[in-house]
Image (cartoon, rainbow, N blue to C red):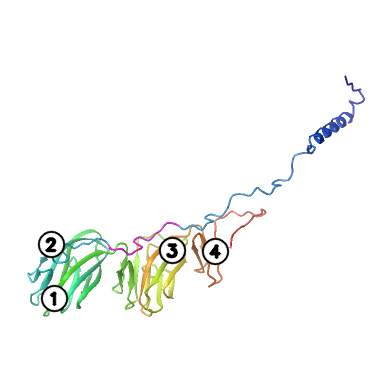
Amino acid sequence: MLGLGSSLLQGGALRSIVRSGLQLFYKADRTQAPLGEEKVRNNSFDEISGNLVSNPTFDLGSEAIQNRAFNLGSEEVVDGDFSSSVNWADSGNQWVINNNTATYTGDSNPNELLQEISFIGGRTYEIKIDVASIGGSLKVRFNNEQANKAVFNQTGIQTLYITASGSGNITDDLSISRESQVAFNAVLNSVSVREVPNWSFQNSAWSINNDKALYDGTLTSYISQSGLTISSDKTYQVSFDIEDSSEQSRIQISNQATNETYSPYTDRANGSYVVTFTPSSNQTTLAFKGHISGGSFSLSNVSLKEVPNWSFQNSAWSINNNKALYDDTATSYISQSGLTITAGKTYQVSFDI
């Protein structure tokens, strides 16, 4: 038995013996002797907070534009090829339907060729009439309204656009008649009426063909879509294609009232374009306005998406394939607000170029 005298139990002698023993134990175990509590925090430099940046991959919001392909609705006219007269009416017995044609054979009275159709107030409709012959002017309208009518005096396929007045579902007549009380004759091969879903035209300078919106350059005019939610505290990206331009097209992007400009008049050749904007007030419409000083062009692949969490100083920045692109056309920044960056703390910013 190992005995310890009382002198060893006094003072620091016992503590020295224990410490020496522990040192020998840890050395035999090939470990460091125990130290006090670690005072340095994150001494391996691997403790980094979660990402403070929202949407770091530059994802875009959902598509806001409806009918991006400028598709037309279903046919509203029955027997539009005049294969039968059953669905047509004549207000004065001056129209004759025979051999797949409708012929006006009357005098100077403005008798109407009529068919009852269904339409929706406030929406735009494409009317196509194939005219074999005409002497005078022919008038087309809905609901016997003089304000919303189209007038023409040429042969061939005439493409007209009328925006129906009123609201909600309406059943009323499509009316085709002479425009004035003068000698008149006409032979029609066919009539077609189809809705232009979601889009409105300011006037006849715009039309639809082959899934594109066509601007003919004859009038300064817009094509627009309403019912959108465009908030003043958010950034949006508009993308679109310009094709069939005979020269530099001149286009402004704005709201329908044109008192909130998203992109000023800009000369654009054929190609794909991206415009970013933050409106100064809440808006519900998007309009493309062609200027008469430019040439004709076609518009297609229109898109409007929110850019969540990010703001652009100007159009030098855009988003594509989950990247923020800078085009070097202007000194400009992209930014994100709403972050919590505390004084006295250190932060790490990482990014790829």
How far apart in space, not on screen, are marks 2 and 1 (Cα)?
20 Å
Q: Amino acid at mark 2?
A: Asn
Crowd rating for badge 3 (residues with CA inside 10 Å; few <14, some 14–19, many 20+): few
How far apart in space, not on screen, are marks 1 and 4 (Cα)?
62 Å
How far apart in space, not on screen, are marks 3 and 2 (Cα)?
49 Å
Q: Position of residue 262 (x, y in %)?
A: 43, 68
Q: Residue furthest top?
A: 1
Q: Amino acid at mark 1?
A: Ala
Q: Amino acid at mark 3?
A: Ser
Q: Quadrant of residue 195?
A: bottom left
- Tell me the mark number nearer the camera, choosing from 2 and 4: 2
Q: Position of residue 332 (x, y in %)?
A: 55, 68
Residue 87 badge: 2
Q: Position of residue 3 (x, y in %)?
A: 89, 21
Residue 186 badge: 1
Crowd rating for badge 2 (residues with CA inside 10 Å; few <14, some 14–19, many 20+): few
Q: Amino acid at mark 4?
A: Ile
Task: Say whether disc 2 or disc 4 marks the residue closer to the N-terminus.
Answer: 2
Range of the magenta residues?
61-72
Crowd rating for badge 1 (residues with CA inside 10 Å; few <14, some 14–19, many 20+): many
Residue 29 badge: none
The residue where tag 3 is placed is 281
